[in-house]
Image (cartoon, rainbow, N blue to C red):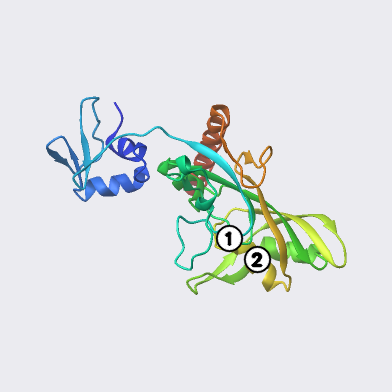
Amino acid sequence: MPRLNRYIASAGICSRRKADELILSGRVRVNDKRIDELGFYVREKDRVYVDDKLVRPQKLEYYKFYKPAGYITTTEDEKGRKTIYDIIPAELRHLKPVGRLDKDSSGLIILTNDGEFINEMTHPSIKVPKVYIVTINGKFTQEYAEKMLNGIEIETDSGEKKTAYAESMPMEITPKESRIQIVLYQGINRQIRKMFAKLGFEVLHLKRIQHATLTIEGLKKGQVKAIKPKQIKELKAYIAKKKREYAKNSNNG
């Protein structure tokens, strides 16, 4: 018998933490009884309602998608721009992206209906790495690498100032252009572009090649492919490990 919060999360509505909030606020009913305490277990014959709407666990789906440049990562756009849902197969358009890539960037996006998984993959405390190959105009030096590692203050879309961090590894450096591998653990919109802009560079090309344990290998631009069960298992084991590391560091702190 699953706990009520896990049952709600498995319906794709939200994460388990958010489900706890729904329960405590009295918005969840099991059969004819309002449940407002945590720890309740759902039996097979029970019917669960959130805001008086019947919810059922759904089959969890996981896909990886090679986003081409020129598309935004959203279901629709008020400016009429092309979105990834214009090229994703119709039968997969109910899936949500794990994080985003801006319009001019390309690369790996994970698509799923697993709300708990999305929350864990994008939660700032867990620090799941994302790996990018970036080409900039100009010569990238060790001095710039150290500045990115130590943190650069950038402005978020809401106007808030935040310190952004990135690990960098030069791959090909010339006086006119530099190709660099970048690893991020944060999720600030257009973070890489804003960091390089602060250093006086323009990003010419940006491609995400890896997210956690998943890589873009074997995908063509615009292609969507189901993630193998073995890969999902490895990915979830990796997330569990990162959560344990965070809990340990929090307790030691």
Q: Mark 1 or mark 2: name the one nearer the start of the chain.
A: 1
Q: Quadrant of residue 225?
A: top right
Instruction: Name the foreground residue: 213 vs 225.
Output: 225
Q: Secondary structure at mark 1?
A: loop
> Which residue appears farthest toward the right when viewing the image?
175
- Give the amino acid type for the residue marked by disc 2 in the picture: Arg
Residue 172 relative to residue 93: left or right? right
Q: Secondary structure at mark 2?
A: helix
Q: Quadrant of residue 211?
A: top right
Residue 49 relative to residue 231: left or right? left
Please report contact status of discs 1 and 2: CB closer than 8 Å, yes or no.
yes
According to the picture, the residue beneath numbered tag 1 turns out to be 102
Q: Quadrant of residue 38?
A: top left
Q: Position of residue 129 (x, y in %)?
A: 60, 48
Which quarter shows the N terminus? top left
Q: Is residue 205 above or below residue 224?
A: below
- Give the amino acid type for the residue marked by disc 1 in the picture: Asp
Rounded to the nearest whole Å, what is the CA distance between mark 1 and mark 2?
10 Å
Q: Position of residue 58 (x, y in %)?
A: 36, 34
Residue 130 relative to residue 4: left or right? right
Q: Is residue 191 above or below residue 131?
A: below
Residue 193: assigned label:
2
